Amino acid sequence: MASEKPSVLIIGGLGYIGRFLAKHIHENSLASELRLVDKVLPQLAWLAPEFEAACSGSNFMQADASKEQALARIFDRTDGKQWDYVFNCGGETRYSQEDEVYKVRSLGLSLAVGKEAAKRKVKCFVELSTGMVYKPNSSPSKEGDKTKPWSKIAVYKAQAEEELAKMEGLNLVIVRLPHVYGPYASQWVATALSLARVYQALDEEMKWLWTKDLRTNTAHIEDVTRALWAVAAWYDAGKPNWDAKSMGDGAPIFNVVDKGVTTQGMVAGIIGEVFGIKWGFQGQLLSNFARLNMDSLVDDVNDDVLGPWADLLADAGITRPGPLTPFMEKELLKDTDLSMDGSRLETVVGFSYQKPVISKELVEEVIESYKKMKWWP
């Protein structure tokens, strides 16, 4: 019966993960009602045509969920019932912002919507977090391992996790993510691809900092959205296979990470092949120098690549390159392993990855999506 489908509210519904989650729910008719809330209007969100139906006006509400006065409008439904699943895909995703920005847009947002979800007894509240909350370790981090956040985003995500877990009556699941990539991706993979395009144009070798073994774990966006839905449905079904003794009696936490144990060397190799460019690593001496002079080094590289990138765009007649830029963020250039173990999701929820390893084909698919949107020079 159609009426048995859960009703779904997505906070940050036009963000990268939110829009793919909305599309997954819409295309598979998983929800009885779907509402996306975002500060940004769909017309300004660089939406590809395939998201138009899922993110259409009838499903969309413009509101700032971090503001308390907006919460009633966001959570109230016309039939007077409460939402079954709430996914918090919102929050500040840009790096190197002021602390205040993360405090309001990430931590403040999580606590505001969490509190409202608890008050209204929402069946499942899924909070998106990051694998950067883990203390970097040579072995992949499991959900119960020590945390020691190493990016500003992670600092405030860790605080949000902690505060939400203490909320009385909140049916909480926490999902920690690695680098998420796929069609239309911005940030991590987009930066690397844009840089490679510049080095290809300059006919220069692309040199990476640190070593080829540095772990940069990944998950494909389509697997991420399937996992988010699987986790909510699992929680709603009474958390089968959950063992509070061994897994902790707090909110369930799941790492969503593919099985590829992605490293910098793997990514560099794939990108080198796709663009037909030489690549290598800076070696110990220069990496040590970089560690001490990160600010000036990153500024130099950004100065070197932004001009040629602008020329490439101009030559291709591209005036709106979407979210793409080769600009490098210092925070992302740390000599720190993003290394996660995703086995709990498979054993407890019974989830299986359809794209278990980042590959040349999947990276080429990302570039094709940029071309389709006329972002790519």
Image (spheres, grey):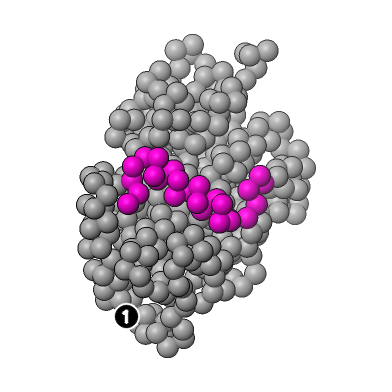
Q: Nearer the viewer, residue 328 or 79?
A: 328
Q: Is residue 369 magenta?
A: yes
Q: Nearer the viewer, residue 65 or 180?
A: 180
Dot 1 amino acid type: Asn
- Picture coordinates of residue 377 (x, y %)? 32, 52
- Picture coordinates of residue 195 (x, y %)? 36, 63
Q: Nearer the viewer, residue 212 or 170?
A: 212
Residue 96, located in which quarter of the rendered image?
bottom left
**How many numbered discs sit on the rendered protein?**
1
Q: Quadrant of the N terminus?
A: top right
- Residue at 39 percent across and 80 percent down: it is 291
- Picture coordinates of residue 47 (x, y %)? 38, 34
Residue 28, located in which quarter of the rendered image?
top right
- Residue at 40 percent across and 18 percent down: it is 58
- Picture coordinates of residue 140 (x, y %)? 64, 65
Q: Is residue 119 left or right of residue 72?
A: right
Look at the image and tell me whether residue 98 can be seen.
no
- Residue at 45 percent across and 46 percent down: it is 368
Q: Nearer the viewer, residue 127 or 215?
A: 215
Circle 1 is placed at which residue position?
Answer: 293
Relative to 167, say whether 219 is above or below: below
Q: Is residue 39 left or right of residue 79?
A: left
Residue interval drawn in magenta: 353-377
Look at the image and tell me whether residue 375 can be seen.
yes
Residue at far bottom of view: 285
Q: Is residue 295 magenta?
A: no
